[in-house]
Image: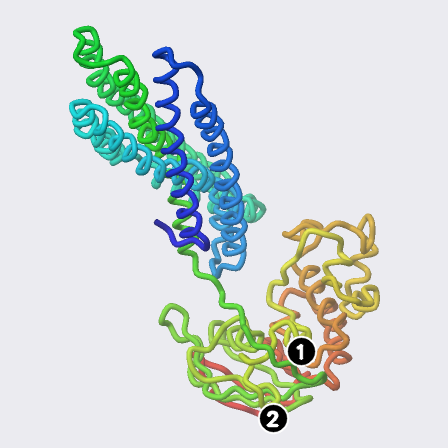
Amino acid sequence: MPALPGLRRYLVVVGLLGVLTAAAVLLQAEGLATLLTGGGVSALLVVAIAGRVALSWGHTVLSGRFAASVRRGLRRRLLESASDRAGVVATQITRGVDATDSYLTGYLPSLVVSVVVPAAVVVRLFTTDLVSALVVVVTLPLIPVFAVLVGKHTRASVQWQLLTKLGGHFLDAVRGLGTSKVFGRAAEQAATVRSMAAAHADATMKTLRVAFLSALVLELVATLSVALVAVPIGFRLLSGGLEARPALLILLLTPEAYLPLRAAGAKFHAAAEGLTALREALAVPVVPVPSGTVCRRRGAPSVVFERVSVAYDGVPALSEVDLSLPAGSRVALVGPSGSGKSTLLAVLLGFVTPSSGRVLVDGVDLRSLSSPDWLAEVAWVPQRPTLFRGSLASNIALGGPADVPAAARAAALAPVAASLPAGFSTPVGELGEVLSAGQRQRVGLARALARRSAGLVLLDEPTARLDARTEDAVLSATRKLLPGRTALLVAHRPAMVSLADRVVELRDGRIRTEVTA
């Protein structure tokens, strides 16, 4: 059973509703037996029927609200996950989270009721007729036994794994469609998607065949079990060995003993995919959110790295890095790709927690700072800026007060905006469909230029995708951005290094040389 917030309380309430349902079943059977033997309609029967209707409605409302809260929590967890498989996460957030409904609102409540109601019915049958009760006790376990035997052949988990693999590959194929077309690989990618879709369809059909077989077996076992009770009851009633009211009570209660188990078995296959998706969503690692509450002063900070080490899956990315950035200084990080430069920026942003060591900001441990307050003081340009669905202006401002035209001019983005159909109001998709790679990079730089109050500037190769002319314009704007701020620049090109007053070389996660520019 996956660990979910509020699951224990939900099961307790469902269990109480199951006990009340069992009481309503017994009262209804008593009332119907009395009615059919000439006793008339009793208030007990009316209360029992109304109670079963109310309890059914209560089950639906309770399970629906719990499932909605679980869906919200799972989507939040997946969105905050550390997974880099965008296609798989997208499939989990949409199809996977919705598939949990069949497990949370269907199978799980039925499973609880299938324990409580049959037990109550069997106890009542023992007080009415020992032979019938023994027959029910012997045949009742046959339903879960056959359900398990048939369920061993289900392929719902394989079906879900194939679906997530298909979703992830399809998203990657669509994103790289232009590149695949240029290099003549589009046909191969289409064939791969078709083969994966065919494998998923085959797994789906096998799961449906097993589900139909399971339903047939459960119905057959339940029907034969009821017949084993009903036929002897009929003969005993005809021979005078049993009175009419007890006989009717037994005949009314016996199907109620098998009904919850049949319902749970019928919903098992529909819930298997949801259960698999639920387990995978809960297994996704989540990026820890810093919980600091200390607020720092405004302005350019001094930053000190003290023996900072970072490892990804046991592989070291940074090893005991010692680095000092005095307030107002400009430091350039150089080194080959994979040497740990971007990881160093991620630590400073709070996105990565060091496995050892610490980062001091104005003498205060970075982990104790309020994350929103700290990030509000940072202007960051990553290697690949993330764009959002909205206008070009909203992508530059990011919801804060900003002089968008001035920031765009400083980042050499104003001519691009002027060439777009609606200027700064032109819609920009998440993949930046209307912008080139270099233009998307300039959007990221314009964001940093728009944050006039930021005391710390982090630039991760901001001119990597720009031509020489645009690079000169961006460097000119960057020179205006840096005075009065602490800056850490990841640079490969000499032009970016020239903006720094100190150059630090990073190799294999360690600082090798440090030169004053």
With respect to residue 516, does 177 lie above or below?
above
Residue 313, labelled with which disc? none
Which quarter of the picture shows residue 275?
top left
With respect to residue 31, does 238 lie above or below?
above
Residue extending farthest to the front is 39
In the image, what residue type sits under mark 2? Thr
- Residue 130 horizontal/vertical position (percent): 17, 26
Alpha carbons under labels 2 and 1: distance apart: 19 Å
Question: Could you say which is closer to the camera, residue 163 or residue 177?
Answer: 163
Disc 2 element: strand
Q: Is residue 14 left or right of residue 214?
A: right
Crowding at mark 2 (Cα within 10 Å: few <14, some 14-19, many 20+): few
Q: Residue at x 71, y 83 (%)?
A: 298
In the image, what residue type sits under mark 1? Val
With respect to residue 224, does 513 lie above or below?
below
Q: Is residue 146 left or right of residue 467?
A: left
Image depth: mark 2 or mark 1 in front: 1
Q: Which residue position is annotated with label 1?
A: 457
Question: Could you say which is closer to the camera, residue 486 or residue 463?
Answer: 486
Q: Is residue 506 left or right of residue 202?
A: right
In this orientation, does residue 173 appear? no
Disc 1 element: strand
Q: Residue at x 71, y 50 (%)?
A: 434
Tag 2 and tag 1, C-beta contact below 8 Å = no
Q: Residue at x 16, y 7 (%)?
A: 239
Q: Which residue position is annotated with label 2?
A: 516
- Residue 39 horizontal/vertical position (percent): 38, 14
